[in-house]
Image (spheres, rainbow, N blue to C red):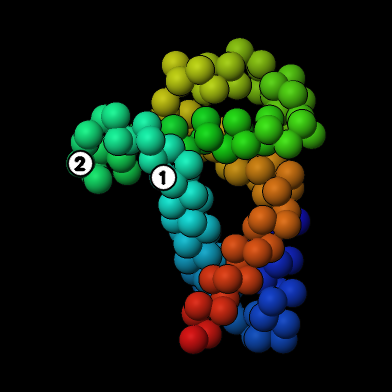
């Protein structure tokens, strides 16, 4: 489900009253907050790995940022709704591109590939995104 539809659901009439620029800014803000929530979840999921690195918090952030799409693809795969081939078909890229991303060979994918993977992740983990948006909206209202 696109973010615009989720925002319309949570904000009801208020979202329709926003100008185009305001709605784009709101979508971007929520996207950043959702990505921060995922980074925090990945950080706690890999806390033992980061202990082994004995690095700075900045290094942890760099590792998560570099591997963010790889972690999203792995999360999609963990649901068993898609295989690597299915992901490749959805994002309209060769399977080799997805394999390079998952294996860490391609740590700097194109923006189009990133956008398509994020969209697929949102479709596969719709309930999680709904919860995150609801949490963000409640925090913003407080």
Residue 16 - label: none
Residue toward you, 74 or 111: 74
> In what element is the residue under mark 2?
loop
Q: Which residue is mark 2?
A: 56
The image shows residue 59 at horizontal and vertical percentages of 25, 38
Viewport quadrant of the N terminus? bottom right
Q: Residue at x 66, y 16 (%)?
A: 95
Does 124 sit left or right of 141 as displayed?
right
- Residue with the mark numbered 1: 43
Question: Dot 2: few (<14), some (14–19), or many (≥20) neighbours within 10 Å?
Answer: few
Q: Residues within 10 Å of mark 1 (few under 14, many from 20)?
A: some
Residue in the picture at 32% in, 43% down: 61
Q: Nearer the viewer, residue 123 or 125?
A: 125
For the point 52% across and 30% down, which residue is it? Answer: 70
User: Residue 121 occupies which quadrant of the picture?
Assistant: top right
Marked residue nearer the N-terminal end (1 or 2): 1
Figure check: 21 above or below 59: below
């Amino acid at each position: 489900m696109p973010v615009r539809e989720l925002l319309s659901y949570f904000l009801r009439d208020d979202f329709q009253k926003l100008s185009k620029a305001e709605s784009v800014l709101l979508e971007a803000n929520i996207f950043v907050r959702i990505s921060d929530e995922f980074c925090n979840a990945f950080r706690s999921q890999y806390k033992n790995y980061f202990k082994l690195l004995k690095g700075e918090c900045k290094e942890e952030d760099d590792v998560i940022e570099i591997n963010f799409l790889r972690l999203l693809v792995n999360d999609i795969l963990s649901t068993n709704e898609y295989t690597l081939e299915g992901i490749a078909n959805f994002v309209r890229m060769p399977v080799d591109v997805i394999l390079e991303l998952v294996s860490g060979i391609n740590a700097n994918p194109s923006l189009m590939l990133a956008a398509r993977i994020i969209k697929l992740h949102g479709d596969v983990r719709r309930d999680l995104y709904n919860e995150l948006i609801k949490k963000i909206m409640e925090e913003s209202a407080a």
